[in-house]
Amino acid sequence: MPEFFQFLVSGLTVGAVYALVALGFTLVYSASDVVNFAQGEFVMLGGMVTVFVSTAGVPLPLAALIAVGVSIVIGLLLYWLAIAPARGASAISLIIITIGASIFLRGAAQIVFDKQFHKLPSFSGDTPVNLFGAAVQPQSFWVLGGAAVIVLLLYVFLERTLLGKAVLATAANRLAARLVGINTATIMALAFGGSAAIGGIAGILITPITLTSYDVGTQLALKGFAAAMLGGMGNPLGAVVGGLLLGSLEAFGAGYISSTYKDAFAFIVILVVLFTAPQGLFGRRAVERV
Amino acid sequence: MLARLSQRYGVLIALAAIIALLPLVFPSTYYYRVASLVWVSAFAAIGLNILMGKAGQVSLGHAGFFGIGAYAAAIGPAHLGLPSLAALVVGAGFSALLAYLVGRPILRLRGHYLAIATLGFGALVALVITTESHWTGGPDGMPVAKLSLFGWRAGGSGTWYWIAGGLLLGGAWIAFNLDETPTGRAFRALHDSEIAARVTGIDVNRFKLQAFVIAAVYASLAGSALAMMNGFVNPDQAGFLHSIELVTMVVLGGLGSVVGSIVGAAVLIMLPQFLTVFQEYENLLLGFIIIVSMIFMREGIVPTARRLISRGRA
Amino acid sequence: MTILKVDDIGIAFGGVKAIDGVSFSVDAGQIFSIIGPNGAGKTTLFNVISGIYEANRGRVELSGENVTSFTPDALATRGLSRTFQNLQIFQRMTAVENVMVGRHLRERCNLFADLFRLPSVIRQNRNTRDAALNFLGEVGLRGSADMLAGSLSYGACKRLEIARALAAEPNVLLLDEPAAGCNSVETEEIDRLIWRVAEKGIAVVLVEHDMKLVMKISHRILVLERGRLLIEGSPREVRDNPAVLEAYLGKHGARQPARA
């Protein structure tokens, strides 16, 4: 049983990061129909900027804040310089653009920073806490708690504020949103900036556990995209559940079955889910209109 | 129709001429190698373009089939005592079978769901190749026996240049063939309107599957050829980034355009060769060029160029 | 001879009954029109008959065979063809290629022969193209054969869809608003075309808003209102029925003759 909790906690911790990346995917996808493969790069930026700014002598909380700010700026630039000018291009062309952006950011990171692995100190020390017999790193609480706060804030923003409702309206029907006077370009910029912030925070929270380097983005984008699809693309709740599920599956698969095939379980489950529920776990089935 | 017919053979003849004459201007054997790499990648891209450009189905895991072809050429001679050419055929057959079995459920998905499912499939293939190291040499890869035919061994980059060029010509010829056949029309029809294709009696699942299998065989053959050419394979050839590279070749060159796939492959293979001069700025520039060309040539290089030329004439 | 028989069809979307217990049958060579106000369920009915939607209840028979819940392509092999209200042409193919796709079931389609473009494929392709050109001629589009379908006018696309549907040589042809967006000359042409089709013994089921056209060419008319069958009868019976006027124009407009 302690073993079970050990796997569960480490699975949920990694899963929380997947969930945040998936949330970023979902936010951008809802607002703009773009699948942003550069989403993982924001996680990399969050971690890397924090590492380099704090080693320069800036206190960690301030460094983290700067990192989130940098992520947001990069997210907005990505929208204004690469996505907005390509308005009207096909879905696959837009995907290629975001992949280009991901390669670009990776290239920029290897020049601005370096190609080494970097670590951040844990926020509350490294003494494990005993929980149901499992030794839990204090940083895990930071990751899970941080993710929960972000999800909660996002929920409040979307459901309780006028701007949030405008985002939801844009996601539901872009033309109708524009007709009632919503500036959809602003909403899209907001979505890119927001998802960049979420990715950046995820990067800061997880770096003390998993380390970071200029090229961690691709794998995270892959897992985040998978989590978003697992939950049903465009559904924020689905993204969170999909991420946590994916992380847990990997942890249990690695723990109980085979650690070399850790990544395989996630993809096998995704394939099985898609075969049985082609719109993801929480996706709605669309009626074809002709 | 006659005009299109002659245009098709015009392109094939021009391609043959380019392949034949290019070595005249090569200053060193290094150029033979890069050109062969372009021909092989273009061959794979043409296959993927049949799936993506003609039938309109995306695959983000196509390097999986490329990897299967590559490792078939490696494992066949090394572990199973197969001659290289037989290994290539077995690899292609295995890829076709796997594409058929996996494609049946996968191709019922649409859009991004199809994208993630194919991505997952590709990731699984890459994972198996990396993990089963007693067969594949694991992450370090393994050497590949040289191709030998009736005692004649294909060795130097000069020989491979001609083999790769011939392969590309054959692949382009078949892709052109498809256009004016019931199968090719069914592909294009289901791309434009799946619902209309179905009411005209086209079994869309069957044709999607055919396009998927064709693209898988192209990728597998390209993988085998590259493995034998390099004399070495590694798991990156089956990986996600290689899948993305193949898709980018197709889209950058122009969806549905055979010439486009060749141009796309040429750009994506040659660009990094030039960019190595810029050393660590390589990734930065590569990403930048991809973004800029997709923004300003969103239909792809060849269709955009064709439109500009026809506008210039008018 | 009854070709198409629709029996007690019902379908609901999210609890809303779009079609509720509709039955009718169409004979070979008959022109059968379905009319009704917007949202009455005409296109939904077409989508059920052609296998795009699956009905919750009821039964569809084609030439005596129970084809309920068959897929669209299975129905096509049994002689059902249709056009769409919102155009569904193959935009990136030429006009003649669109119609050649319509010949799909009349062609031998073998992957290996096609990949290597064997002589038999080339020969067949020539025949298919000739046949397709004839069908294009029937709708007056022969001159646009090699134009990209996406560049044709709306009215031409409508006729292209009809040519594509006819190319399959169906027993039953469902036409969804073929005259929409057509001027009076074009409507006249479609009128004659539908007559010619019916004379060949094809059962034509027509959804159309142009009442003049409907009254002129239909053998029988079915009026649909809010998913239910209001009345079925000859053009005269339908025209003289007060309930129809009311359904179309509301109580106040009932004095106006239904010519709109």
Image (cartoon, coloured by chain):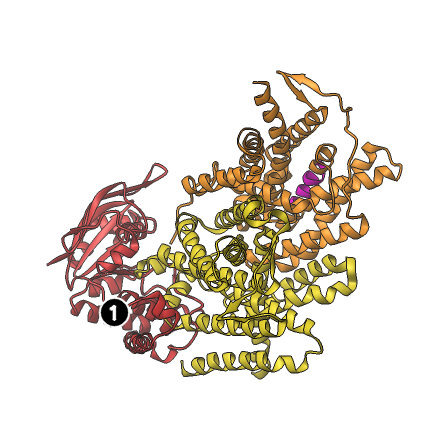
Chain colours: A orange, B yellow, C red
Q: Which residues are magenta?
A: A191-201
Indicate whether residue B9 is drawn in magenta.
no
Q: Position of residue C27 (x, y in %)?
A: 14, 59
> Which residue was labeled with disc 1?
C191
The residue that appears at 18% across and 65% down in the rendered structure is: C202
The residue that appears at 74% across and 54% down in the rendered structure is: A107
Foreground of the two, B174 or B132: B132
Q: Secondary structure at mark 1?
A: helix
The residue that appears at 68% across and 29% down in the rendered structure is: A143
C260 w.r.t. C132: above or below: above
Q: Position of residue C21 (x, y in %)?
A: 22, 42
Q: Position of residue C191 (x, y in %)?
A: 25, 69
Foreground of the two, B26 or C95: B26
Q: Left of C34 or right of it: where is A182?
A: right
- Picture quadrant where residue B179 is located: bottom left
| Residue C85 in sight here | no
Magenta stretch, main secondary structure, is helix
Disc 1 residue crowd, few under 14, some 14–19, many 20+, Cα 10 Å: some
The residue that appears at 47% across and 73% down in the rendered structure is: B170
Q: Quadrant of the C terminus of chain C?
A: bottom left
A95 w.r.t. A283: above or below: below
Q: Chain of mark 1?
A: C
Q: Looking at numbered disc 1 in the image, what kind of residue is underneath it?
A: Asp
Foreground of the two, A247 or B19: B19
Foreground of the two, C10 or B32: B32
Q: Left of C84 or right of it: where is B44?
A: right
In the picture as drawn, the residue positioned furthest to the front comes out as B151
Indicate whether residue A199 is drawn in magenta.
yes
| Residue C123 in sight here | yes
